[in-house]
Image (cartoon, helix red, strand yellow):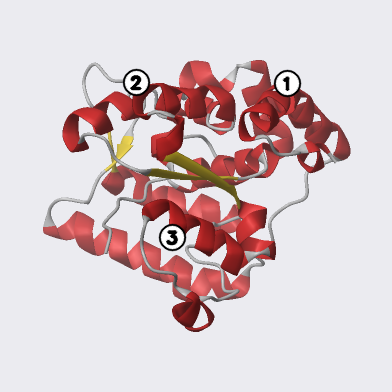
Amino acid sequence: MRYGIKCPDLLGTPEAPIRIRNTLGTVDLLATLRNPVDRALSSYYWLMQWGFIPVSHPESGMGQILSGELQETYPRANEVLEYGLYVKHITNFMAMFGPSRLLVTLTEDWRHTPQSTLDRVTNFLGIDSMKDTWAASSSTKTVNPGVYSARRLAFLTRRHKYILLQYPGYPGKFLQPPTGLYPKIADKLLAATDRVVLARLFSNRKPQLTRSLRESLKEYYRADIALTSDILERDLSHWLR
C-alpha cells in the first residue's frame, strides 16, 4: 500500500518542490495535465466562486487577465494563466526529484483508456494492479463540480466574509474555516441554500468561450504546449484544435 497527498495547486506553486523534498524526502510524483485553455476557464470560475476575483462574465474577466489588468487588484488572478504553463512546473519538479520520479498523464488518458492508464500508475508506484476494483470504483459522475451560474456565484459572495482571510505581508486572500458560532452557522446556511435551492433553479452549464477569446488563449499557450509535447514525447496538437 502507498499513501499520498492530492492537491492540484502543488504543480503550479514554485515553492512546492523544495518544501515537499524538505518535508517528505524523495517521493514518487503523479501529475495529470488538462488542456490548458479548459483548465484556465475552470480556474477562472473556481476563483470567482471563492471570492479571489470578482464575479464577471469570462469575455470580460478573462480579457482583463490576458491583458494583466486584473492581477493588479486581485493577485490570485495570476493563477488562471500561470498554472497552465506546464513546462516550467514540470521541469521544477524534475530538477528537484529527477525525471524518473515523475509520471505525467493527461485527463484524456483517464477518459479514453482508464484501465491502461491506471495500470501505468500502479506499475510506476510498484503496487498491485487494480483491475478488479476499477469497474466498481469508476463513475461518470462529476466529483466536486464547479459553479457556473452567474446568479449562484453572486449569491455565494455572501460567504466570503466568513471564509476568506488576508495575512499581513502576503498578497491576496486565503480560504479558512469560519470561526465563531454565528459565522459557522451563516456559512453553512448560505452553502446549503445554494446547494439545495439555487442549484435546482438555475442551469449550471459551463459557458462556451467565443471563438476570438478561445483563439487568444490558445495563442497564449501555443509555445508552452509545443515544449510540453517535447518533454512528454507525446503529440499534444489536439489541445490547439
| Residue at disc 2, secondary structure | loop
Q: How many marks?
A: 3
Residue 129 vs residue 68: left or right? left
| Pointer 2 or 3: first along the chain | 3
Q: CA distance from mark 2 to mark 1?
A: 29 Å
Is residue 204 depicted above or below 240 in this figure? below
| Pointer 1 or 3: first along the chain | 3
Name which quarter of the figure residue 2 lies in: bottom left
| Residue placed furthest toward the left | 180
Is there CB contact under 8 Å for labels 1 and 3?
no
* Residue on which the image places disc 3: 122
* Residue on which the image places disc 2: 171
Given residues 37 and 63, the one toward you in this image is 37
- Which quadrant does the C terminus fall into? top right
Q: CA distance from mark 2 to mark 3?
A: 39 Å
* Residue on which the image places disc 1: 223
| Residue at disc 3, secondary structure | helix
Amino acid type shown at disc 2:
Pro
Amino acid type shown at disc 1:
Ala
Comparing labels 2 and 1, the label whose residue is closer to the camera: 1
Q: CA distance from mark 1 to mark 3?
A: 32 Å
For image coordinates 55% across by 70% down, the residue present is 199
Instruction: Mark yes or no: residue 204 visible.
Output: no
For image coordinates 48% across by 84% down, the residue present is 136
| Residue at disc 1, secondary structure | helix
Amino acid type shown at disc 3:
Thr
- Which quadrant does the N terminus fall into? bottom left
